[in-house]
Amino acid sequence: MRKFLILLSLATSTASWAQKDTLNKISVGLELVTHGETCGGGLPKPDDNVVRTEDKSHFLFGRNRLVVDYERPGLQAHAVLQNKAVWGMSGNQALNLYEGWVKMTAKNGLFAQVGRVALAYDDERIVGPNDFATASLSHDIVRVGYEGHGHKAHAIFAYNQNGDEVYNGTYYDNGAQIYKTMHALWYHYDMPKFPLGASLLFMNFGMQAGDYIEVDDQKMEDPDNPPCTKYQQIWGAYVNYHPKHFTIEGSYYRQTGKMVFPNKHFLPIKAWMASVKATVKPSDKYEFVLGYDHLSGDDYVPVAYGGPMVMVLHDQLGGFAPLYGSRTKFYGIMDYFYESAYTNGFTPGLQNAFVGAFSNPNSKLRLGATYHYLAVATQLDNFNSTLGHSVELEASYQFTKDIGLSAGYTMMFGTDTMMNLKQDGSNKRARWGWFTLAISPSLFTAKW
């Protein structure tokens, strides 16, 4: 009898282990986002032949997602079908697959992932989904790596093409990404028993330059500007020190290689950026932030307003471009400087000094106010460096775990420097209000 009980116990244990190894889980959910904006001033200047009756804009934007997740030991699959459109927009051209990937994981921490992925690394300054922009960013990639014992190491590869062309070569133009190829390495280490984490990042982008011309309905290389691939690199480090009541973050990145312009010509790049941010949280109800960002800029940026544009011959770019970061998270929600480019295509860089205070009166409500002092990072002829002052007010309320409402109002007090750089007087005084209603119910979950 005793031997029988021992055998029965072993059999039960083995069956339980086998059941865990074959456990499957599937979940289906919705993400419904309604976003509204009202703007007064600060809009891009229209073409000269466009009559603008008022410097205002109001619209509602909807983004609806169907999210499907599958998981079993060693395998994950994730798919997000997305529709995004302005209210009243005709047609259904905005329907797409925002994410769709599979990930295979070994017990020793090695993994491989392939498909369309919304990438996010560190504080999302260089790589992030930029989710507040509602369109969001995702990448078609292969990612392999290791995660375990405080170490994370990722390698990413991407190769983009307009279609399954057989006879027209591999020239890539006007696709979902601005890059033809992308290679990236990311390493992160969390120190044991010490609140410090650090990351290293290297990214190499291949951009298509040159052009094709049409000859007798045939696509031919332009002899004056033949197609080619030019590469640019972003590399640097991020550090996060987070003891109990405060956090200090810092980052430094360099940008090198060649930048490709819309006319398919290119210029060499030598740019950099640095940032530091301190967050103090004396209690669960209060939080204070203080920080500074410096993004390098181009020399000799023309700032002629109300007259002919001064032509400046550049042989090198000095303006740092945060290509795939969540920009509204860092340089003000009303991002004048990287979401909307300067008129002449060059940038004088940016200095952003900011201070903010946030409060949580209860577990559902969060209030905040942030002030930004904004200035260029290069010397301008006939203008001082100050771009302006921005004040941001924010509030959010979480009704339930899957229903939340957030809203904000920004006041921009620009200077003559801002007005002349942007080539539009409306940028001197601007107001912007917004709200976002996010509803994300879980529809179905099953295990077997």
Image (tube, grey):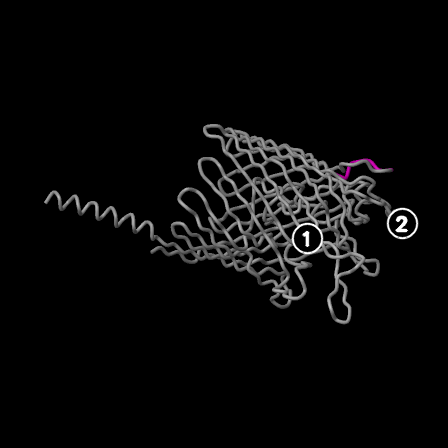
Q: Which mark is residue 38?
A: 1
Q: Which mark is residue 402?
A: none
* Residue positioned 81% across, 57% down in the render: 224
Residue 386 counted in the magenta span: yes
Give the residue type that dot 1 points to. Thr
* Residue positioned 40% across, 50% down in the render: 74
Q: Is residue 243 above or below residue 417?
A: above
Q: Position of residue 354 (x, y in %)?
A: 67, 35
- Name the residue nearer the viewer: 221 or 14: 221
The Cα–Cα distance between marks 1 and 2, rounded to whole angstroms, is 30 Å
- Quadrant (top left/top right/bottom left/bottom right) for the N terminus: top left
The stretch in magenta equals 382-388
Closest to the camera, between mark 1 and mark 2, is: 2
Q: Residues within 10 Å of mark 2 (few under 14, many from 20)?
A: few
Residue 285 counted in the magenta span: no
Q: Which residue is mark 2?
A: 307
**What SS does tag 1 mark?**
strand
